[in-house]
Image: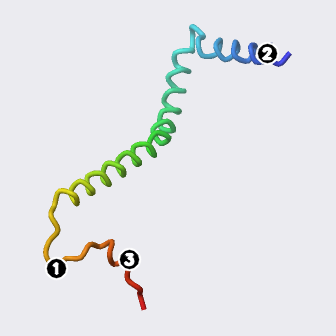
Amino acid sequence: MGVFVLGGALGALAAYFFDPGNGADRRHELRDRVAPFLRVAAQPDELARREVSAEAHGFSQKVQRPPEEGVRDPASYAEQDVV
């Protein structure tokens, strides 16, 4: 019985959006309302990609540059006991 209800709902939805008179307007309105939500949902992936790219670039610069005399590695500060 649930399959028939689902099929009926999908059929009604298809008839609503593919109506020859107003279906195109309804589809365009739906697209205009949904697009901003999809852009926001895709944003965390872009932010994570940028963060990984920046970390990789920083690491490559650190590896390529020879250590300077008298300058300590910032990671060695974490090893000190803070009083």
Report which quarter residue 8 is drawn in.
top right
Say what amino acid the circle numbered 2 marks.
Val
The residue that disc 3 covers is: 78
Amino acid on which the number 3 mark rests in the picture = Ala
Q: Residues within 10 Å of mark 1 (few under 14, many from 20)?
A: few
* Residue position marked by numbered label 2 in the rendering: 3
The residue depicted at 74 percent of the width and 13 percent of the height is: 7
How far is disc 2 from disc 3 in space, using C-alphas? 62 Å
Labels 3 and 1: the sequence-earlier one: 1
Q: What is the secondary structure assignment of the residue under circle 3?
A: helix
Quickly name the residue at label 1.
70
Q: Who comes first in sequence, dot 2 or dot 3?
A: 2
Compared with 44, 76 (above or below) is: below
Q: Marks 3 and 1, Cα distance to the nearest angstrom? A: 18 Å
Residue 63, how many percent across, how many down?
22, 58
Q: Give residue 54's mark.
A: none
Residue 35 located left or right of residue 68: right
Above or below residue 68? Residue 27 is above
45 lies above or below 59? above
By what rule are the colours in the image chosen? rainbow
Q: Are marks 3 and 1 in contact (CB under 8 Å)?
A: no
Camera-nearest label, 1 or 2: 1
> Residue 5's spot in the image, x, y percent?
80, 17
Q: How many marks?
A: 3
Q: CA distance from mark 1 to mark 2?
A: 74 Å
The tag earlier along the polypeptide, 1 or 2, is: 2
